[in-house]
Structure formats: structure tokens, C-alpha cells
Image: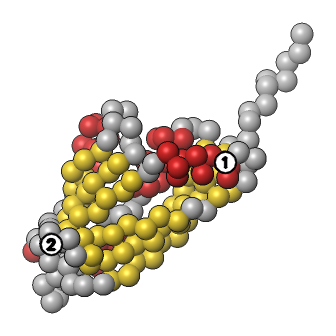
Amino acid sequence: MKASHFRLMMNIWPPFLLTGIHATRVSDDYREVDCELRLRWYNRNYVGTHFGGSLFAMTDAWYMLMLMTILGRDYYVWDQHAAIQFIAPARGTVTARFRLDDTILADIRANTAGGDKYLPQFIVDIVDSKGTVVAQVTKTLYIRKKPAKRGSGATS
């Protein structure tokens, strides 16, 4: 799927659309994603800052979806664990950036080549318009190479 179509689909996906989460950029090779969350009446908490669940949700699924696309159908890729640390009150527009480089991808492929599971961790900073980190999310993914498919069993 073209990255522009993927971005549009994610932006109209109800969990993102209804919380105001918006993907602003998806690179053509799926190695870079940027998203933002603007403070609105429907996503603020009692004290007027971003609702923590919306901050957490803006980091959900990105690395899993990026890796599923990059690695292809030969791999299982699942979100396994995530934790958020709230650092400062989040006001205004906040952003998160997701990045995968050649080193990370080579590490994943090397650690799963024998069919073993691999649990890499990714840290995502959520920053405000001044560049202040307001929250940090640690994501752990489960990645495993699928076993090779056996032949049909027919012999000649």
C-alpha cells in the first residue's frame, strides 16, 4: 500500500480520528512516521491538559505496523508491552516521531533468523511545541520469523 494511502487510512481510523490523533507524515519506505495531537475540548482532562490515554494512544501500533510492512509476511510482529511515563503537563499540540534505520532492521533480522522470538524495545518521546518532552513511552515488540512453509507433499 502506498504510504499516502496508509496515512489517510490511519487518520480516519476511529481510535485516532475520535481522539484527534493525526499522522502528519509517513515516509515512502515506512521507516519514518510523525504524528501529532492537538489539544481540543474532547481530549483534555479535568485540569485542562492532554488526557493521558490520548497521549498513550498516539504511540500505539506505529512500530508494529511499520515493521509489518517493512519485514513482510514472513514475520510475526506484535505489540507485546508498553509503558508511559508522564514527565510534564501536555498543552497545545504535541508530536511523536517513530524511526527505523538500517541498524535496527539488521538487528531484528539477525536475531530472528533462526526462528527465535526477539523483543526489541523502542522509546518514543512525546514533545510539545517548545520541544519539551511531556511523556515518554517504551514499547516492546514481539518479532519472530515464520517457519518456512513445507511443500505440498506431492512427489513425482
N-term-proximal mark, 2 vs 1: 1
Do the residues bearing badges 2 and 1 touch, measured as CB atoms within 8 Å? no
Q: Residues within 10 Å of mark 2 (few under 14, many from 20)?
A: few
Give the amino acid at mark 1. Answer: Ala
What's the colour scheme? Answer: secondary structure
Q: Quadrant of residue 51?
A: bottom left
What residue would you read off at disc 1? 110
Residue 100 percent location from the top left of the image: 44, 51
What residue would you read off at disc 2? 130
Q: Does 107 appear above or below 45?
A: above
Give the amino acid at mark 2. Answer: Lys
Q: Quadrant of residue 49?
A: bottom left
Quadrant of the drawing holding the N terminus: top left
Quadrant of the drawing holding the C terminus: top right
Q: Residue at x 57, y 62 (%)?
A: 120
- The Cα–Cα distance between marks 2 and 1, rounded to whole angstroms, is 38 Å
Residue 82 percent location from the top left of the image: 47, 71
| Disc number placed over residue 131 in the picture, else none | none
Question: Could you say whether the residue bearing mark 1 is in a helix, strand or loop?
Answer: helix
Q: Does 41 appear above or below 105?
A: below
Q: Is residue 137 among what the camera can see?
A: yes
Q: Residues within 10 Å of mark 1 (few under 14, many from 20)?
A: few
In the displayed image of the protein, which residue is found farthest to the bottom? 47
Q: Residue at x 85, y 24 (%)?
A: 153
Q: Residue at x 33, y 36 (%)?
A: 28
Q: Residue at x 47, y 54 (%)?
A: 64
In the displayed image of the protein, which residue is found farthest to the right? 156
